[in-house]
Amino acid sequence: MNPGLAQILTIAHSTDVAEIEHVQCTESVDVSCHHSVDTWKAVGFGLPVGDPALPGMLEQYTRVFEDAVRLMADCCRLELDDDVRFEYELGTCTKDVDLGWYHLPKGSLGGCYLKYVGTAAGTPRVEMHLEWQMTPYTDPHWEIQACYITKIDGDPCIYSKHYIFPKPGTDFSSPAAFASVGMTITGMPALNAIRAVVDASAGIVTSADLPLRAFAGRFRSR
């Protein structure tokens, strides 16, 4: 989903734009439903915000999102400068927070706003933002929108939100049931692309090379 389909949706929206100045894709999510202790330890959630290792940990384990920036630039035939810049803002827990499966002491990292910024001739052109919140009790605090957001500045400008809702009647009585929605949207773009990948010419292809129909879901048989 991200990196992946989120950026393809952003690029699809650029079809309406005559001249692009800036493209931004944002993931704005409450991550407390993702019960992966190892993941959040790796990126430093729960460590004191003043820990000097924290920015490096966040960058090391989120650098994969540079791919999102380069994919969008490739789709727009934009040649980026060599380096994709990492920027961050940290949310400090304003009180002790016990999620049951993870503990966030007061003063520790409880949320973050990360940016991967692609520049051309020194000017920011293509960006991937990650707005992650483990708890709302942080300073600063972000209003999580629980969706993927496309923002294109140009002529005309585009603003779009992509929401994902569970199937009606879904039982969310367990964390595993809730997480299954995330696992579905993570896996299906790859599964739905199999036919197009098989049909493609030999060599390496990316989502930028595949037709949009590669991501078409299947109707339920009766």
Image: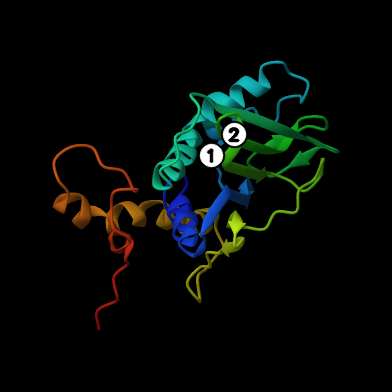
CB-based contact (under 8 Å), mark 1 and mark 2: yes
Count of numbered tags: 2
Residue at figure coordinates x 64%, y 27% from the top left:
44
Name the spot of residue 181 as percent of width and height, x first: 47, 59
Residue 152 is left or right of residue 189, and the answer is right
What is the quadrant of residue 90 in the picture?
top right
Instruction: Please give the residue where the numbered disc 2 appears in the rendered image.
Output: 40
Name the spot of residue 221 as percent of width and height, x first: 24, 79
**Disc sitting over residue 36 in the figure:** 1
Name the spot of residue 190 as percent of width and height, x first: 31, 51
| Chosen colour scheme | rainbow
Q: Is disc 2 surrounded by few (<14), some (14 to 19) or many (20+) residues within 10 Å?
A: some
User: What amino acid is found at the position of numbered circle 1 in the picture?
Assistant: Ser
Q: Give the secondary structure at mark 1.
A: loop
Residue at figure coordinates x 73%, y 37% from the top left:
110
Residue at figure coordinates x 47%, y 41% from the top left:
68
Q: Quadrant of the C terminus?
A: bottom left
Residue 189 is left or right of residue 13, and the answer is left
Q: Nearer the viewer, residue 9 or 218?
A: 9
Query: How far is the residue under mark 1 from the one under mark 2?
Result: 7 Å
Residue 167 is left or right of residue 87, and the answer is left
What is the quadrant of residue 127 in the picture?
top right
User: What amino acid is found at the position of numbered circle 2 in the picture?
Assistant: Trp
Residue at figure coordinates x 61%, y 20% from the top left:
56
